[in-house]
Amino acid sequence: MNLPPPGRWLALAIALASSTACSKAPSKEPEHRETPMTDTAQSHTVDGYTYTTAPVEATLGPHRYAFPANLYDDQMGPAVGGGIGLTLLWPDLQAAPPGTRASRSMSDHHRAISLSLDYIDALPIAELLPRKTSTEATTEDGSINRDDPRRRLDLRNAGTPHFGLTPYVIDEARMTRFSEAYAAQRGAPPVRTPETDQEWYIARDTQGALATFITCNPPQDGREGLTVQGTTLVDDPDVPVATCTHTFTDPQDGLSVRAIYPRVLLKDWKAVEDATRVLLARYKLR
């Protein structure tokens, strides 16, 4: 399986950590408005480098794309080593204006939806999400960890759907039995902090197969660290920003897409998928 280069994941982690840490100091900087995708190139020079909306080619497996430069996460082009990183700004889900990455306000950082695109060739693309929602690929046969109900969709309980997603919560009875078996084998129960257990959300296609898998940090006392006020995300200075990791696929081209955004934007998960698919179709060369 082709995985995103470590450098890009590190940069993404740093950006998210910086965004969360700085959220406690509300910014009064002006927001950068999104740049509509057009055929007329725009440019902006910063410190001697000219950022542009001109197309820059990138490859995912056998597929070639020519995304506008400002759509890439560094507003320059694809990362070295495989995979593609793009950034969309909520709510319009368009690229930021060229040359504005370094000067984004904290509100813009929170509005930035990071997309990581990868070509999957190590297994059939239809198996990707089932593997992510089970323990078979990450544990040995017979291992006690294979029975961890926190990590298996089939051992979680479906909740009431909302936003077109079905939440799957940890089955506490199963968790108790697992903890007892784990302690009997390992001498101590598994480490767990229930208030930080990841939330799981699922969407299926018309045939019932997994189509979307989203994990989120839970709110703290019902607070997500941000609130939506019109088209602006406003910091809650007393609570860390809860984030979601959203995985879906492009079965036709064998692509995996991972989106990361604040939990307060979970309601727009389908719009994120739709916008990504439009970009892939629009800028595909072959």
Image (cartoon, rainbow, N blue to C red):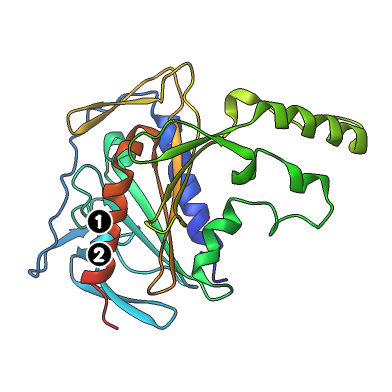
Q: Is residue 162 above or below residue 272?
A: above
Q: Is residue 89 above or below residue 37?
A: above
Contact? badges 1 and 2 (CB < 8 Å): yes
Residue 82: image location, x then y, percent: 47, 72
Q: Amino acid at mark 2?
A: Leu
Residue 110 falls left or right of residue 131? left
Q: Quadrant of residue 36?
A: bottom left
Look at the numbered disc 2 and give the secondary structure of its residue.
Answer: helix
Residue 46 falls left or right of residue 240? left
Query: Residue visible at 36% across and 20% down?
Result: 236
Query: Residue visible at 59% across and 23% down?
Result: 195
Dot 2 surroundings within 10 Å: few (below 14), some, or many (20 or more)? some
Residue 230: image location, x then y, percent: 17, 29
Query: Residue visible at 80% across and 57% down?
Result: 140
Residue 154: image location, x then y, percent: 62, 45
Q: Quadrant of residue 206?
A: bottom left
Q: Amino acid at mark 1?
A: Ala
Look at the numbered disc 1 and give the secondary structure of its residue.
Answer: helix
**Residue 143 — which label?**
none
Residue closer to the observer: 96 or 144: 144
Residue closer to the observer: 14 or 198: 198
**Can the viewer see residue 5 in this picture?**
no
Query: Residue visible at 28% across and 34% down?
Result: 107
Name the quarter where the C terminus is drawn.
Answer: bottom left
Name the quarter where the N terminus is drawn.
Answer: bottom right
Residue closer to the observer: 199 or 44: 199
**Can the viewer see residue 18 in this picture?**
yes
Alpha-carbon span between mark 1 and mark 2: 6 Å
Residue 181: image location, x then y, percent: 85, 35
Dot 1 surroundings within 10 Å: few (below 14), some, or many (20 or more)? some
| Residue denoted by label 1 | 275
| Residue denoted by label 2 | 279
